[in-house]
């Protein structure tokens, strides 16, 4: 045995690979059992089908990773053993052995979930090799499950549900995950709509499929349609090759349409067709395509107002609003602030290698009393900044750098000190836009709600005022 093979054998033995060998040929059972046991100590052998059925069905025994069984046995055949083993544990790899005139029957068992079929007689080392492949297959399945669990845990790590409203949201989201109905997530920017969408996807039968996200407000109408539906070569100037759209990419998973209310009525008509019939056309295409993507829509806008002003079609609204989840702003669920802050502090202290072990009482009081206009996203950014800049091991109120001026207090009208020589509205407007951009790290999508406009309106104002920032794609220097 080579050094690599010895290492693999040691690893497999340490992880306790459980194998059941079933065959009524005593000589084969002895020789093959010894070869298997040399690599995976503790191989269990059964001489007939009844004994095998008892072993695979024994609830006091851990399920087998691999069952290697003869196809034809007295009393109970290999198919019955296959069904019993996989009913107990769906990931058990069942390998069937059959004489050459019975291979066709064994192959048909693969439709029932058999992992492999071996024609007898076969050399011992070749059978061991096929079993090794089944063991590796099981190991990969375990790794995928582990990674999926890690991803699911990470997604839910910052879904804090101390408040009654968030507990209701999480419970409803998990229930909605089991069905394919369209979910509409509403709430102010930064409240965690994308995280809840990830929770729904992660708990759905589509969790192994892609979770695809698109911000409908970030793209012009023509580019958005190309992104969603794809296009054929020559569909428009510059379309030099076919493009697969997001509805196709997400067909076995979930598609999150963020800022859905920013789409035009014309685009809404096309989306409505997909939602109703799961059918669409690529731009420039003539053949209908189908998608099986689960749709989640999200918006921070008041959809009733959008219905009244005509920017949102009524039929489209009722089609996306099958299951609605409204995420309350952080200021209305202050019970969540302390635990959110602690979890973000632990995360960023670990990631940034900083010795932050907690918050002072003054810092916690400030966070609980602060209105958090940017909601959880603002809290996250504030904690990351404070962990990075804090001088001591505890984060104090001054480390948080939370703005207190320029905000209405207790419902009173906001006041501004007018200079003696006056102030133009254009100057105030520019200062307000810049303040919102700085607060959100120059992310237009997050800044727009802070001054009560849509992202498209904000983009128009930015262009009109000539505001630029190095992080914006249109302002980057060409390579």
Image (tube, rainbow, N blue to C red):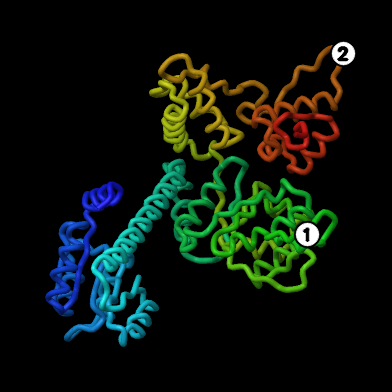
Residue under numbered circle 1: 265
Q: Nearer the viewer, residue 213 or 365?
A: 213
Quadrant location, the C terminus = top right
Q: Give coordinates of residue 32: x percent, y percent.
A: 19, 68
Task: Determine the image quadrant of residue 364.
Answer: top left
Q: Nearer the viewer, residue 236 or 315?
A: 236
Task: Determine the image quadrant of residue 230.
Answer: bottom right
Q: Secondary structure at mark 1?
A: helix
Local crowd size for mark 1, using a 10 Å CA cut-off: few (<14), some (14–19), many (≥20): some
Residue at point 76%, 17% (across, down)? 417
Task: Determine the image quadrant of residue 359.
Answer: top left
Q: Nearer the viewer, residue 31 or 87?
A: 31
Residue under numbered circle 2: 421
Residue at point 82%, 61% (across, down)? 234
Q: Secondary structure at mark 2?
A: loop
Q: Nearer the viewer, residue 115 or 361?
A: 115
Residue at point 31%, 75% (across, down)? 118
Q: Is residue 228 left or right of residue 128?
A: right
Q: Is residue 159 left or right of residue 463?
A: left
Local crowd size for mark 2, using a 10 Å CA cut-off: few (<14), some (14–19), many (≥20): few
Residue at point 74%, 21% (across, down)? 416
The tag earlier along the polypeptide, 2 or 1, is 1
Residue 163 visible in rendering = no
Which label is found at residue 477?
A: none
Give the CA distance from mark 2 to mark 1.
Answer: 46 Å
Q: Give coordinates of residue 138: x percent, y percent.
A: 33, 60
**Nearer mark to the viewer, of 2 and 1:** 1
Residue 289 visible in rendering = yes
| Count of all numbered marks drawn on residues in the image | 2
Whether 68 is drawn above or below 400: the answer is below
């Amino acid at each position: 045995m080579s050094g690599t093979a010895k290492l693999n054998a040691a690893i497999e033995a340490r992880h306790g690979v459980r194998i059941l060998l079933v065959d009524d040929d005593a000589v084969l059972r002895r020789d093959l059992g010894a070869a298997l046991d040399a690599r995976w100590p503790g191989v269990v052998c059964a001489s007939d089908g009844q004994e095998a059925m008892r072993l695979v069905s024994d609830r006091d025994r851990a399920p087998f990773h691999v069952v290697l069984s003869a196809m034809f046995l007295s009393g109970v055949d290999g198919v019955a053993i296959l069904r019993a083993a996989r009913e107990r544990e769906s990931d058990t790899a069942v390998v069937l052995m059959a004489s050459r005139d019975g291979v066709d029957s064994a192959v048909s068992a693969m439709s029932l979930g058999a992992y492999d079929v071996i024609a007898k007689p076969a050399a011992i080392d070749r059978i061991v090799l096929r079993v090794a492949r089944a063991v590796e297959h099981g190991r990969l399945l375990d790794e995928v499950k582990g990674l999926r669990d890690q991803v699911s845990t990470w997604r839910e790590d910052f879904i804090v549900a101390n408040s009654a409203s968030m507990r209701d949201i999480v419970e409803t989201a998990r229930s909605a995950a089991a069905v394919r109905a369209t979910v509409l997530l509403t709430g102010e920017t930064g409240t965690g709509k994308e995280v809840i969408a990830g929770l729904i996807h992660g708990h759905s039968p589509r969790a192994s499929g892609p979770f695809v996200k698109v911000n409908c407000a970030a793209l012009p109408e023509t580019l958005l349609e190309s992104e969603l539906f794809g296009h054929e070569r020559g569909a428009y100037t510059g379309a030099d090759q076919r493009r697969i759209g997001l509805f196709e990419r997400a067909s076995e998973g979930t598609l999150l349409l963020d800022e859905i209310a920013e789409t035009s009525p014309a685009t809404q008509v096309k989306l409505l067709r997909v939602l109703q019939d799961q059918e669409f056309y690529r731009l420039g295409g003539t053949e209908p395509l189908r998608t099986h993507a689960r749709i989640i829509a999200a918006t921070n806008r008041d959809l009733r107002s959008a219905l009244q002003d005509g920017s949102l079609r009524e039929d489209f609204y009722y089609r996306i609003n099958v299951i609605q989840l409204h995420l309350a702003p952080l200021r209305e669920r202050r019970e969540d602030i302390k635990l959110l802050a602690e979890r973000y502090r632990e995360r960023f202290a670990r990631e940034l290698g900083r010795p932050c072990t907690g918050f002072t009482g003054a810092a916690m009081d400030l966070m609980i009393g602060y209105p958090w206009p940017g909601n959880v996203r603002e809290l996250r950014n504030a904690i990351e900044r404070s962990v990075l800049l804090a001088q001591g091991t505890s984060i104090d109120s001054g480390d948080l750098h939370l703005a207190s001026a320029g905000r209405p207090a207790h419902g009173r009208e906001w006041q501004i000190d007018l200079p003696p020589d006056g102030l133009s509205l254009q100057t105030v407007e520019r200062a307000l836009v810049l303040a919102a951009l700085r607060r959100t790290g120059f992310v237009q999508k997050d800044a727009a709600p802070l001054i009560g406009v849509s992202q498209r309106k904000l983009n128009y104002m930015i262009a009109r005022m000539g505001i630029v920032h190095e992080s914006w794609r249109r302002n980057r220097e060409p390579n």
